[in-house]
Amino acid sequence: MKQFDTLTLSTQGSALILTVDQPKSLNALAKEVVNDLESFLDWFETTGYEYRGLIITGAGEKSFVAGANIVQMNSMDEATFTAYAKQMHAVTERLESLHVPVIAAVNGFALGGGCELALACDFIYASERASFGQPEVNLGLVPGFGGMVRLPRRVGNAMARELIFTGRRIKAEEALRIGLANRVVPAEQLLDVAVAAIEEAAAVSPTAISIAKRAMVSMDGLDTHQGLGREVDAFLQAYHTADSVEGRSAFVEKRSPVFPGN
Ligand code: CO8
């Protein structure tokens, strides 16, 4: 298994679990963490085909990711600052386009850049002690790792404005109610529930998931007519895969499909 200074990788069933492992700073996204996330994606995109899903969580019992590293940010010049933001933007876009489902298993604080990292994941599962927020306004800042783009898409424009303009921190149950979190579970069950979701996805066609993921990302911002056009393209692409031939044949032959994965 590939090793990183700031991230820990482990396997559970069909899932790869990536733990941001900087508990002393509540797993804040220091430059070194973002570098490692990039290197991880380089590795996972090219060699991670045995895994059917990725789960991202944070080390320790207190925090998922407490945001960008504020201490480091203070000593960055403008060029470094801009490069840092762009690098994290690239990480979030790559997570959105990964060939497998990505779940944020939020086990504590998901603040600022931490909430934005979770927003780049397909589903957010929260433990009962998770909390979410975009507290940048408390620092005289605004979200910079995608929160102003992705939070409105997830929770609607009015709720996103309320969270961004007040910097208010919300608990897991409220995150569930507004559609930010998909599920809230007891902390000790969080990873098992996330792994179970990956196992559910592992039972279906990996090619279909990958096509659906990429199509849905490419539809962001399109009007209904354009979106429907993309959907036809994606449907046709899926229709011609070996997985689809197998899935449709298995249905007709009244047997379980064995997807070749292409
Ligand atoms: N950066 C660096 N260090 C941090 C961070 C952080 N974001 N969060 C916590 N830490 C450190 C603390 O400094 C402390 O270190 P030490 O023990 O050396 O003093 C340690 O983690 C533990 O933290 P606390 O003692 O504060 O723990 P508490 O339980 O009292 O409080 C909180 C926990 C509420 C999470 C508190 O630490 C906090 O408010 N943290 C900051 C949260 C925040 O504001 N996050 C948003 C940051 S800005 C951002 O993410 C913008 C992203 C876009 C950037 C674009 C760049 C171009």
Image: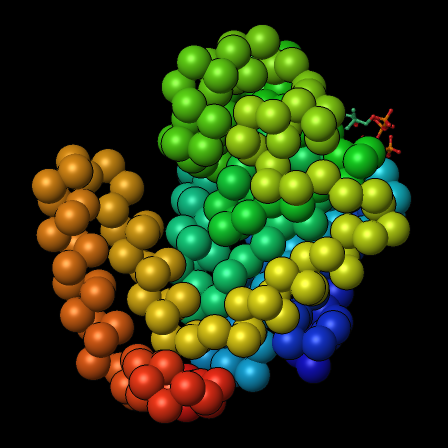
Name the residue nearer the viewer: 114 or 195. 195
Image side of residue 174 versus residue 227, left or right: right
Residue 66 rendering spot, x and y as whole percentages: 71, 35
Residue 62 rendering spot, x and y as whole percentages: 85, 38
- Pick the quarter of the image with the N terminus: bottom right
In this rendering, does residue 16 appear at all? Answer: yes
Q: Quadrant of ligand 1?
A: top right
Name the residue nearer the viewer: 159 or 208. 208
Q: Is residue 169 above or below residue 69?
A: above
For the point 54% across and 58% down, the residue is: 102
For the point 12% across and 44% down, the residue is: 226
Name the residue nearer the viewer: 18 or 252. 252
- Pick the quarter of the image with the C terminus: bottom left
For the point 68% across and 57% down, the residue is: 194
Q: Is residue 131 above or below residue 261?
A: above
Image side of residue 177 versus residue 249, left or right: right
Q: Is residue 225 above or below residue 50?
A: above
Name the residue nearer the viewer: 236 or 210. 236
Residue 176 rendering spot, x and y as whole percentages: 63, 31
The quadrant where residue 107 appears: top right
Residue 104 rendering spot, x and y as whole percentages: 62, 49
